[in-house]
Each structure stands twice: as C-alpha cells, then as structure tokens.
Image (cartoon, rainbow, N blue to C red):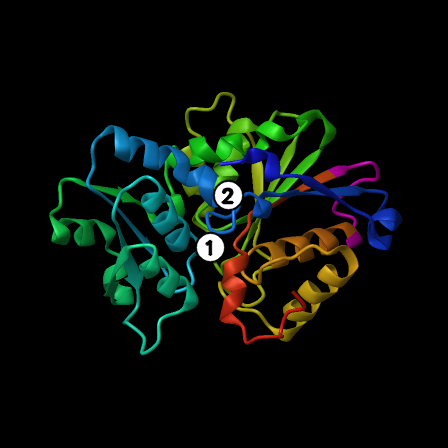
C-alpha cells in the first residue's frame, strides 16, 4: 500500500476565519480505491495474523452497503485467501453495488435475519470451521485498533489541538487515542442514533494505554440515525464539494464535517484551536444514491 498517496488538505472558509480556528483534513480516502481510508489500517494486522496462522478463509460481518465488507473482500483476495461475508438482513432481489463487487472479489455471501445477526457467536459456531479467521463487524477489536493507531504516523501531532473523526464501531477512534498525546482533545462524531454503549467499547480497546486518554463522543449529528441522509445533508455535502473539491460520504464524513462547522459556529472551539478531521474514506457508500444526486 502506497501511504504517500495520503495528504492533508487545508480548508479555508469564512466560518473558520470568523471563529479564528483552522481545519485540516487527513485524506485517507486517497489511499486506495477499494480498501479505502481507515479500512486498510484496521484490516492490516488481522490479515497478517490470518496468514501467519495458516487460516484457510477470512470471514466477517456487515450490511448491504458496508465499507468493511468490500474492503475485507479485497484484502483477503490480495492476501490469496478466500473470504466469507455474513450479511445483515434477508437477501434482496437485487444486490447492492457493495455486495456485487464483494462477490466479484471472491467473497461468498450468507444472509441472516437481523435478529440472528445480533448473535454473532452463534453464527460462528454454526459454521464450525476451525480454520477460518473471523473478523468482527467494522474490524472491531484490539488488533483493528492497533492498525488504526498508525493512521497518525504521517501527521505532525504537535500542530493540532483537536482530532475529530466519525465513529461507527469505535475502532478507529480507539486507534487515534492510542497514538495521540495528552495535549490533544479527541472527539468522535457518532453516525448512529442512541449509540450510548460506544464509550465502553472504545475504553475496552484502549485499556492497556497508560495513562488512559480522555475523549468525547458527540451524539447530536446522526441526522436521524445510521444510514439516514436527509436532503439537508445531501445539499451540505454538495456545497462542501463545490467549495473545496472535498468529496464526503453520506454515512460518516459528511456528518462529521457538518458537526465540525456547527460546533465551531456555536463556539465549541477556542480562538487559535487547530483541528484535524480524519477523512475515513467510505465514498463507495454514496453509490446507494441515484446518479447525479451528488455533484461528484
């Protein structure tokens, strides 16, 4: 993987000038067209471990538009391993772009009811495949957090007072916490409604970090819930692209960028604060929208 493809985009805008804060965006979305953004970092050590342990297959979990599913399918193929995806919900009449591409990459798909999907240990037992290597949904786990901790390797950490990122499973944010210093404020923007257990999930992943870093999760910018994308969000994402040529996705980064702007305008940050937003990739999820809804 060519890490040199990642760069930092400085954002210049009136709302930043007015609030006397600066904003850079770490463009992880440029890393790879399929294993996009934070996914490569989270999957890196899982795939290495599966190979080292001579596992025959990589198996994982996700939804119909899961960034993790498509990234895991590609990463497994790249490592020379078959892959299996356990997909939440009944099989649709027409597969999503994500699942179609995952199949093309060699992933075998199994659809389970939403009720059964919650019982992942039971699913793993049903397959009874001791030579399969299982990765939790979204790459959640300490191995995923270890990989995510390398996201900030190319960043001059002393330059930033705040690091802000979207939160799904919390694995990436845990990685950022493992790599951050006590001088930084780490803020996660939850893409899910009522995701109150996320704090404990993150703390579990960083329990060996001493001293334990502090962080905050903001639950005010989910736009109605996971996967919800009202017209106001679509318009905002298009506006950002027109102004800065910065493509955002409708599940994670669009909501995170909106949150940063809204918090700045509400004086959440102090004059002189220097913000770094992590662009976690996931642009393939935009293909769930009809053509020409987005400007890119």
- The magenta span reads 265-274
Foreground pick, 104 / 144? 104
Foreground pick, 180 / 75? 75
Q: Residue at x 52, y 30 (%)?
A: 150
Q: Where residue 205 sits in the image (x, y, percent)?
A: 41, 34
Q: Residues within 10 Å of mark 1 (few under 14, many from 20)?
A: some
Q: Residue at x 84, y 39 (%)?
A: 271
Residue bearing mark 2 = 38
**Label pair 1/2, CB-CB below 8 angstroms:** no
How many callouts does the rendering have?
2
Q: Where residue 37 sits in the image (x, y, percent)?
A: 53, 45
On screen, residue 146 above or below 266: above
Q: Residue at x 27, y 35 (%)?
A: 50
Foreground pick, 193 / 67? 67
Q: Counting residues from the N terminus, which is met first, the one under dot 1 or under dot 2?
A: 2
Please tell me whether mark 1 sits on a helix, a strand or a loop: loop
The question of residue 272 being in magenta is answered with yes
User: Can residue 204 be seen in this snapshot?
Assistant: no
* Figure quadrant of the C terminus: bottom right
Residue bearing mark 1 = 195
Compared across the picture, whether 18 is left or right of 85 comes to right
Compared across the picture, whether 164 is left or right of 78 comes to right
> Residue at the bottom extreme?
93
Q: Where residue 58 sits in the image (x, y, percent)?
A: 26, 45
The question of residue 123 being in magenta is answered with no
Please tell me whether mark 2 sits on a helix, a strand or a loop: helix
Q: Where residue 216 sits in the image (x, y, percent)?
A: 58, 42
On screen, residue 136 above or below 203: below
Rendered image quadrant of residue 290: bottom right
On screen, residue 292 above or below 137: below
């Amino acid at each position: 993987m060519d890490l040199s493809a990642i760069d930092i985009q400085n954002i210049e805008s009136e709302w930043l000038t007015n609030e006397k804060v600066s904003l850079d965006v770490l463009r992880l979305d440029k890393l790879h067209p399929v294993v996009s953004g934070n996914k490569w970092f989270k999957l890196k050590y899982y795939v290495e471990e599966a190979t080292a342990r001579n596992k025959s297959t990589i198996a994982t979990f996700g939804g119909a538009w899961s960034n993790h599913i498509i990234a895991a399918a590609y990463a497994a193929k790249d490592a020379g391993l078959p892959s299996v995806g356990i997909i939440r919900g009944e099989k649709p009449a027409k597969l999503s772009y994500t699942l179609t591409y995952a199949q093309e990459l060699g992933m075998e798909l199994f659809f389970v009811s939403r009720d059964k999907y919650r019982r992942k240990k039971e699913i793993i037992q049903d397959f009874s495949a001791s030579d399969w290597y299982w990765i939790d949904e979204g790459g959640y786990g300490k191995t995923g957090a270890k990989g995510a901790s390398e996201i900030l390797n190319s960043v001059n950490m002393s330059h930033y007072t705040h690091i802000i990122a979207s939160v799904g499973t919390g694995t990436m944010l845990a990685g950022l916490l493992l790599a951050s210093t006590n001088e930084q404020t780490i803020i996660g923007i939850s893409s899910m409604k009522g995701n109150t257990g996320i704090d404990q999930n993150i703390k579990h992943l960083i329990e060996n970090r001493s001293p334990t870093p502090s962080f905050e999760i903001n639950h005010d910018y989910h736009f109605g819930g996971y996967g919800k994308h009202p017209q106001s969000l679509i318009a905002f994402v298009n506006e950002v692209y027109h102004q800065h040529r910065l493509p955002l996705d409708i599940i994670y980064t669009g909501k995170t960028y909106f949150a940063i702007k809204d918090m700045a305008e509400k004086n959440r940050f102090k004059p002189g604060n220097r913000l770094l937003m992590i662009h976690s990739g996931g642009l393939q999820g935009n293909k769930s929208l009809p053509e020409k809804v987005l400007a890119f």
